[in-house]
Image: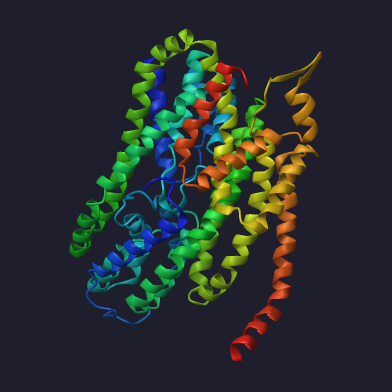
Amino acid sequence: MLFEALLIALLAGVAGVDLFDGLTHMHRPVVIGPLVGLILGDVQTGLLVGGTLELVWMGMVPLAGAQPPNVVIGGIIGTAFAILTKAEPTVAIGVAVPFSIAVQGCITVLFTVFSPMMHKCDEMVKQGNWRGIEWVNYLGMITLFAFYFVVAFLPIYFGAEAAGAAVQKAPEWVLDGLSVAGGMMPAIGFALLMKIMLKTNYIAYFIMGFVAVTYLKLPILAVALGAFAIAMADYFNQNRAQPQAARNVEVEDGI
Amino acid sequence: MGFNETDAANAAKAELRMQQALATSHVERDDYIDTTAAEPLTKKDINHMAWRSLALQASFNYERMQAGGWLYTILPALRKIHKNPEDLKNSAQMHMEFINVHPFDVTFLSGLVLAMEQSKEKISTIRAVKVALMGPLGGIGDAMFWLTWLPICAGIGAALALEGSLFGPIVFLLLFNALHFGLRFGLAHYGYRAGLGAISALKANTRKISHAASIVGMTVIGALVASYVRLSTPLEIHAGKAEIALQADVLDKLMPNLLPLVFTFLMFALMKKGYSPVKLIGVTVLFGLAGKFFGFL
């Protein structure tokens, strides 16, 4: 178990850095899930849990610098837990979320602690110490890596079996309840996106997407392509309409 | 720095930080000593800058956000442009000021800024461009990447993964990064070449690009709600001798996916009232537990 836990911790370190730097998005649960599965010898479960967790985190993106519940730790703990305890993917969400919220808090602290480094940078600039500036940035990434390494290693190495035993003793309605809640959870991510984007004139497009799946049973890509076509038509129509609108405004201003 | 703060509050905070940063700026003079335009940067220089932009948030912090990574991104090019050491220090001091831009389309701004540095614009002009473009670039980046492209790619990837296919993660990574890296490098060269001329073009198109991205985004979210939110009830109504299954006989006939839709809008309404996502996650867990305990879910 030590070897597997170390490998997973290494993966967590790389993914943790990717969340802020690199941003190839290999840190998303849909990728992390099967990778954790590979380490623990169950890729299939990893895929299922990763896919499920991906939907939960879909709307939790870092807008305007705010930190959502940590997607890296959520994906890793959730998948590892599901494989080690043979729990349902939806149950894994209930376990993953508290961890990811705790890590979100730690990251906030980390970003606060890093603030004084900026004054060091000011001095380095004055001295023309360009190597130093570069090393502050490397140090930031190393710190992130180390942090994620530890945070992923500890619960998997020490906690997974205890957690597994607790799960086996838990009454059935608790596990089923967590599972039902997990099925509902994607709604929170979607609601978050809607809070940001949903203005009155976009409700029509929401309805269109909903109807396309509910009644027409179209796959997501088909719906996205259709919407892209509409957005394109809208964009070019706007371009044509604009000169006239601009002229009207000018006339009003003139009077 | 909670996740439940409104956009307006975040924007106000960012603006306050910006003012503080400008007030505490250490820049000594506004003009460069050596005002002859530097040699143009090569394609290699711009590509190097684009690679380095991957570390934009390496020293992220709440005081100046991406300032350290921003200087790291443009530093090699700055050193090539400013042969006079005093000029270089002055420029670097300005670039250590607060900056918060989207980490995907940042290269447009850094390309543009390098074009201005290369033609030795006044420091205050370069700073003004940085400040003016931070917001629009952030808005376009959020709308395009976080709210449109990521949900589309992740939706496709997750759907494949849930079928047990390894193509899920592979397709997700390929799709997402094709646009990501294409734009990162494309915008770096575009920003540099376009120089100052690009600013007005971008400002005119900000609204239209966000609008188009919102259309695709909202449609996909509507589709995802119907595909992935799962909620149904096993309740049965006993009316005399007849038994009516609430889900199959009533709700599904009214409209399939009605409960997921209602629940999503409930979450949306609560969020608008100021409930944080974390609180709603907690409430959902309790609701699921209660639903199983009392048997209505």
Q: Residue furthest front?
A: B240
Horizontally, residue A28 falls left or right of residue B122, namely right
Q: Residue furthest bottom?
A: A255
* Quadrant location of the C terminus of chain B in the rendered image: top right
Horizontally, residue A91 falls left or right of residue A110, namely right
Q: In the picture, residue A183 is in which quadrant?
A: top right
Q: Residue at x 47, y 20 (%)?
A: A81
Q: In the picture, residue B228 is in which quadrant?
A: top right
Horizontally, residue A54 falls left or right of residue B102, namely right
Q: Position of residue A215 (x, y in %)?
A: 80, 38
Q: Position of residue A36 (x, y in %)?
A: 49, 25
Q: Residue at x 31, y 40 (%)?
A: A142
Q: In the picture, residue A11 is in which quadrant?
A: top left
- Would residue B17 be seen by someone viewing this image from the given angle? yes
Nearest the eye: A248 or B147: A248
Q: Is residue A111 above or below residue A93?
A: below
Q: Is residue A185 above or below residue B64?
A: above
- Would residue A41 be seen by someone viewing this image from the given angle? no
Nearest the eye: A35 or B24: B24
